[in-house]
Image (spheres, coloured by chain):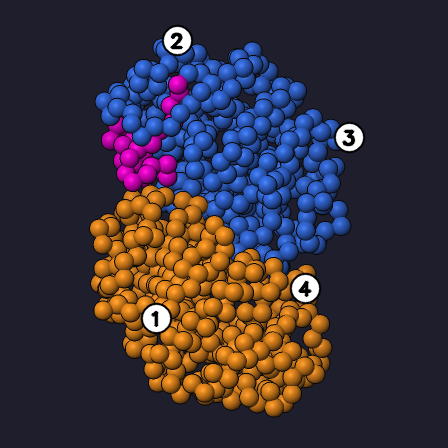
Chain colours: A blue, B orange
């Protein structure tokens, strides 16, 4: 029997949408109230399809369902793969009244969202995220897009889903590395805005790592709530929303250096958050004890604590310079004023930044 | 000396923007008030660049200007060419505060607009249309996009420019076929909404065909005003805006059949409007005399009056079935209730439609 544990609304005026969190939802929960017309195109990948496609189809009783199965992996988050979605939509003659459904992780969600934003200049879509990372991060907030060889997520759109359905049961089939990657973003919410949640995470990290359903449901709910709250205040990333990028400027540089897909996004963010905490100490904001507490929690989630082998300070500086968060050439970073309180700055001391980078690279 | 002939505002609330129409504007008119940051990327093509690039640069005094020159032609309105813009932006390290400038015809405008809509999930852009078609049509309304092998303009976004600068002098270098193609859209405005403008066009068609500047300025202004008025009432094409597609369902089928770029968009629309007028007679809306009047005016603009050689009724039916304006499978067409009054219908009689198609194909 389906069991809705929690439900919340992302408040964006006309573009508001619900996030439904629970167990046994796939195969049972009726998503047709969020489908405008008669056509549904489920977009998934070759890893998720054998596990959940049939159950996902059962969420759309009475609709004409087509499916496009993409190859799995961040390295396919490119135009060629995106175009498979457009081709399927056109071959199956989907009109402007179609609804796209993203069934999979962040890559499937970002690509399906961008396909929905761009197909015939915009059609609706529904998110069914099946990884922890996508459940707590990429399915909330409307950021969609693909990678460019010169930079991650450089081509995309803001496009909000009609609804997000999160079935925590899907995490039972998730590889442990991907659970850790998701936990990086969960920890991030504690670090940037919610010290009590950070304490809760310190108490429940073991339960989360062992996929205890109630703990997972709670962590997903509080993460989505935090992100939804930030996004509602700043839909298009004019200001506040930038704090959601804690660890991401360092992390994107790591991902680009390593080659998309070799480091998971959450892994790179995990290391990136440690780097941000380190720089926050050097900038005189948090104590070494605070940093140690953050690092310890991130390590308990089995996340890497150093940059990839062979990555130099110069590699970081070059790759960070093209980051989207920069404005007119100045490097913008998210740092911690205290645990549970992040801020954005373009004024971090270059010497401190160098020292942080130096501390996290592998010494030749 | 620059000479602003006319100026109008497209009223879209927060997204409102001005259209400035005149002579001697390129090289003299200061566009920096519509540039947010310091970076400008001018996107143009290899036909327009030698003619107007230096003059266009002079419209952005004090800004850091980069340029990307695309190959000219509708057949390059694809992802590979669009990606040249993203690559140039990333290589030159353009941030979210960059401003794109479209210098060229409809293809450059549509692609630059979509690049602006998608680069880092959206940056501003300015239109400097240099063909009659783009001046009266594609630079107004915010439709941007690229073609897919299975359908024209199937991938894109609604993205409004910051400003549109129309210098009628650019038409002096335009090939006569392209002038005719632009006049097709000018005539369209008279047919769908403005019978007095249709009368004005009947009186001034010779002046327009011979590029008389005052007549051109007036035709551009009245066309933009008509389109701006329709778009302001229906930005995202929920209803009224669909009448702007008079002749386009037939026309898109012709363009797709002929292969993009072999027939100009305006040429296909010219023939398509004759077909719409013919079907409007068969549907009992306008008289054969009205149709003859419309056809005569379209012919005076030197537009083709038949489908391409070898195109069959079945070709039309197949290609029209994937048109964006269809909803849940029903073919939607724009027809004329009278000259100067268009309507949208999904109920045209299939027999009448067959008869119209039959009347416009080349008989085997």
Structural distance between the alpha carbons of marks 4 and 2: 64 Å
CA neighbours of label 4 inside 10 A, class few (<14), some (14 to 19), many (20+): some
Secondary structure under the numbered disc 1 in the rendered image: strand
Rendered residue at 51%/84% (across/down): B199
First to last magenta residue range: A312-337
Mark 4 and 2 residues: CB-CB less than 8 Å, in contact?
no
Q: How many marks?
A: 4
Mark positioned earlier in the residue sequence (1 or 4):
1
Specify the subunit that label 4 lies on.
B
Q: Which residue is mark 4?
A: B329
Residue B136 occupies which quadrant of the picture? bottom left
* Numbered label attached to residue B5: 1
Mark 3 Cα-neighbour bin, 10 Å: few <14, some 14–19, many ≥20: few
Q: Which residue is mark 3?
A: A1
State whether discs 4 and 2 lie on one chain.
no
Q: Nearer the observer, disc 1 or disc 2?
A: 1
Give percent across and percent down for residue A67: 62, 50
x then y, percent, for residue A232? 54, 35
């Amino acid at each position: 029997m389906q069991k809705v544990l929690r439900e919340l609304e992302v408040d964006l005026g006309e573009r508001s949408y619900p996030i439904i969190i629970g167990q046994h939802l796939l195969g049972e929960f009726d998503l047709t109230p969020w489908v405008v017309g008669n056509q549904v195109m489920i977009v998934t990948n070759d890893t998720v399809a054998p596990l959940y496609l049939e159950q996902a189809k059962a969420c759309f009783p009475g609709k004409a369902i087509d499916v496009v199965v993409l190859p799995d992996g961040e390295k396919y988050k490119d135009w060629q793969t995106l175009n498979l979605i457009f081709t399927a939509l056109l071959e199956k003659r989907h009109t402007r009244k179609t609804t796209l459904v993203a069934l999979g992780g962040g890559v499937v969600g970002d690509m399906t969202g961008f396909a929905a934003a761009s197909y015939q200049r915009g059609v609706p879509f529904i998110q069914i995220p099946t990884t922890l990372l996508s459940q707590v991060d990429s399915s909330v907030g409307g950021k969609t897009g693909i990678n460019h060889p010169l930079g991650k997520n450089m081509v995309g759109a803001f496009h909000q889903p009609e609804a997000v359905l999160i079935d925590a049961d899907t995490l039972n089939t998730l590889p442990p590395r991907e659970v850790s990657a998701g936990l990086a973003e969960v920890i991030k919410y504690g670090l940037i805005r919610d010290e009590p949640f950070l304490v809760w995470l310190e108490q429940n990290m073991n339960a989360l790592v062992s996929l205890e359903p109630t703990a997972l449901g709670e962590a997903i709910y509080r993460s989505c709530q935090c992100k939804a709250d930030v996004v509602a205040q700043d839909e298009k990333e004019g200001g506040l929303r930038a704090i959601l990028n804690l660890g991401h400027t360092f992390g994107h540089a790591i991902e680009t250096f390593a080659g998309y897909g070799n480091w998971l996004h959450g892994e790179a963010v995990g290391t990136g958050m440690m780097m941000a905490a380190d720089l926050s100490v050097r900038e005189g904001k948090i104590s070494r004890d605070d940093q140690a507490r953050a690092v310890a929690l991130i390590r308990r989630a089995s996340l890497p604590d150093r940059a990839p082998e062979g990555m130099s300070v110069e590699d970081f500086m070059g790759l960070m310079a093209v980051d989207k968060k920069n404005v007119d050439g100045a490097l913008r970073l998210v740092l911690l004023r205290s645990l549970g309180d992040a801020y954005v700055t373009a004024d971090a001391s270059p010497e401190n930044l160098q020292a942080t980078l130096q501390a996290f690279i592998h010494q030749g």
